[in-house]
Image: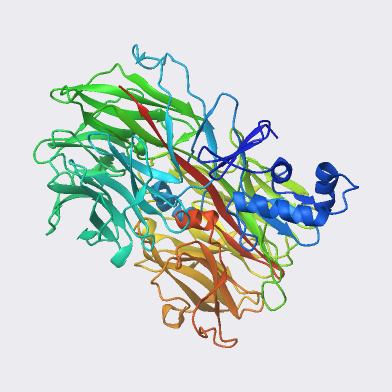
Amino acid sequence: MPGRLRFGVYELDRDAMELRKHGVQVHLQEQPFRVLAMLTERPGKVITREQLQEQIWGKTFVDFDQSLNKAINRVREALNDSAATPQYIETVPRQGYRFIAPIQEIPVTAAPVPVVPGPASGAAESTFRAQRSHVVLVVAASAIALAATVVVAWWRQPRSHPLPEPRHITSFGVFPTLTRDGKLLAYMSSRGGGMPRIWVQQTAGGEAIPVTSDAYPGGWPDFSPDGTHIAFYSTRSQGGIYIASTLPGEPRLVVPSPSAEHPQFSPNGDSILYWQDGTLFTMSVDGGQPSALPLNPILRVYGAPVWAPSGKEILLYGVRAHRQHDPAAWWIVPLTEGQPRVARLPGIEQNERPEFAVRAWIRQANNRDWILYSTSTRESWKIWRVAVSPGNVIDQNPEMIAAGNGSLGPGGSASEDGKLTYNIWSSTGSIYEIPIGDRGQKVVPTLQLPLPDGGTYLSPSVSRDGKWMAYNSSFPGKPNSFLLKDMASGIDHFLDDKGRDPTANNAETSISPDGSKVIFERDCKEGTWPDAGYPTRPLPCSFLVAAAGGQPEQICERCTPRGFSSDGSIVLLQKYDLTEIDKSRIVAFDLRTKTEQDFLSLSDAPIFHAYFSWDDRWVVFKKSQSLHLSEPLSEILIAPVRKGSPAGVGEWIAVTDGDHYDDKPQFSADGNTVYFTSTRDGNLCIWAQRLDPVTKHPMGTPFAYEHFHDSAGRAGAYDVFGSDLSVARDKMLINLPQVHSDTWMTQWR
């Protein structure tokens, strides 16, 4: 491993023998430091007590056990870690210790910085996850190296100057925003653990102060023009937009709607602009009734809008309402009367996520207007400024003001005195195993599967005997692959490397009960997601391949594989409509005759994630109650299956009440329990519901089966569509994101 490493909020310099937290050195004596260094040398691997003794104390040291225990305790104290609920160092009984947090090296020339996730999710919902992924909290690490001045061939003489050094503000921060005068900074963060809150601090330095209670997650803060108040979204009282004093105080609800997002004060501070279900509204800061903007019938909005400094126009990302399959673009739109026109920002089409490209439209003290926007790939990014003259004429000679490696997160802000704040994000995905007994009880602690460092691992699907796992694996710069793992030997067998890109699409797998065949996804050659703002995002097609290998065979279009029948002859597929996501349904595909028939559908709601019970007499599935991005709701249902067909709606059994986001249901081996993922306690955890053995009606209420009250669980709660659950006779598997974000600030003028 290299000499300098980052994990969580800590940096470890092995050569200098220094441990730092948020850049501040943490004192650690030599032996505890050497123990930590040795554990971080092989993250995810068990380091035995004998190995530690031999390399640190030597085999002749008689008080080794006591000294090692003290050293481990000192390391845990330095990392604020717990042996009972470890985030960094896990005790492996009767063996040794394992470092379990994600680690990234810090290049010698790099300044520490963050990066954005992309573990993909259940395919039907990728359109929702793609719009929602901008709120994923972060907990891993990345690094940026400032880029040199470049000449971009597709721009006409772009201007650039030596870039100033950025200043690290905080870890675990997203959606930073500055006051107009640049003296205060607010952001959403889960710093200190718990739920994400809004924090505010002086840009000149000093401690951050929480503005909101951690009992109610909040996001998308925006300062009033005078800096005395902050508008933000909160989940309290079923969700809505609130205004709070910049100093801690009780927030005031102004927009009571769980689907209202991205509040922004108007330049004069008398109203708030917000985005809701593809349309824009304004609301007086004193409350009242919202006003729909005249542009709503004209444009479908796919990203957070930005006020022009005059308050007379809005800059937004969207598409003409009557031509929603056209490529989306950034538009300058009059607030009252007049026609929208495309904002021609040089090179903006060179973005992996163009809906996040515009960072600010700012007017400085000299009355010069600037639009700040980014160009980015997964490996690097640049932020540019371009002048805007009277009449909103955009100069075509941009100037680069910041650059770096990694992924630039959404949001960011600029101030009149020339400050710029932004996030750099990183993400990987891990698979966890929960060993279970013959009655479904958890028998030993949950463990993270030892997969190669730096990869993203998604969609685990396990055979019923627990011997085989199909899953998706991806690494930066490499095509993602579908693999089949022998769970006993740990050996992987290659299945396909033409799968979907999990940072832009889904990458789903489903293994047959006996492990003999796997169905996985590739991009369809035709068809894109409807009404998602991503007209080039292809729909999935599913392919069947034998576990022994061979040529994959396409079995369906616009579909995602889900549950198999017990003999592996029938597979349930999610089918997607080309025009409306709400029409998503379940079909049964016969692998012998290569025919499909309708299985489950509703006229007023989409259905996802259908799986048979192990005796094929029941099917469990999810009905989406609400597709609001801020507060999705769903209901777990069971239907009897007779002669291969499910019973009608009148016989469907409600397993959960539809008041939470419950997802990815699975039957236990005996059919008397349904397991599912849920965010009902603020983290993405595994829950369970006992069933009557005969009727399958719920017995009692749902209970927490396995908690993930850590960074992975918090991140998973903000990317609920991205985690899959699979149940075998002796184990459960779940994938969770490992993500991290830092807030940085630079002087762009």
Which image quarter holds the C terminus?
top left
Measuring from the top left, give residue 325's x and y in whole percent.
33, 42
Res 69 → quadrant: bottom right
Which image quarter holds the N terminus?
top right
Q: Is residue 512 among the parts visible in the rendering?
A: yes
Measuring from the top left, give residue 318's x and y in whole percent.
28, 40
How does the figure colour the protein chain or chains? rainbow
| Residue occupying the point 28% across, 55% down | 248
Residue furthest out toward the top: 157
Q: Please, is residue 635 above or below residue 736 in the view?
A: below
Residue furthest out toward the right: 60
Q: Please, is residue 702 above or below residue 75 in the view?
A: below
Measuring from the top left, give residue 565's x and y in whole percent.
64, 69
Number of dots carrying numbers: 0
| Residue occupying the point 15% across, 36% down | 313
Q: Nearer the viewer, residue 518 or 702?
A: 702
Q: Nearer the viewer, residue 657 or 514?
A: 657
Q: Nearer the viewer, residue 309 or 154?
A: 309
Looking at the image, residue 330 sits to the left or right of residue 94; the answer is left
Q: Nearer the viewer, residue 509 or 209?
A: 209
| Residue occupying the point 74% across, 53% down | 97
Measuring from the top left, give residue 643's x and y in whole percent.
58, 78
Q: Is residue 449 among the parts visible in the rendering?
A: no
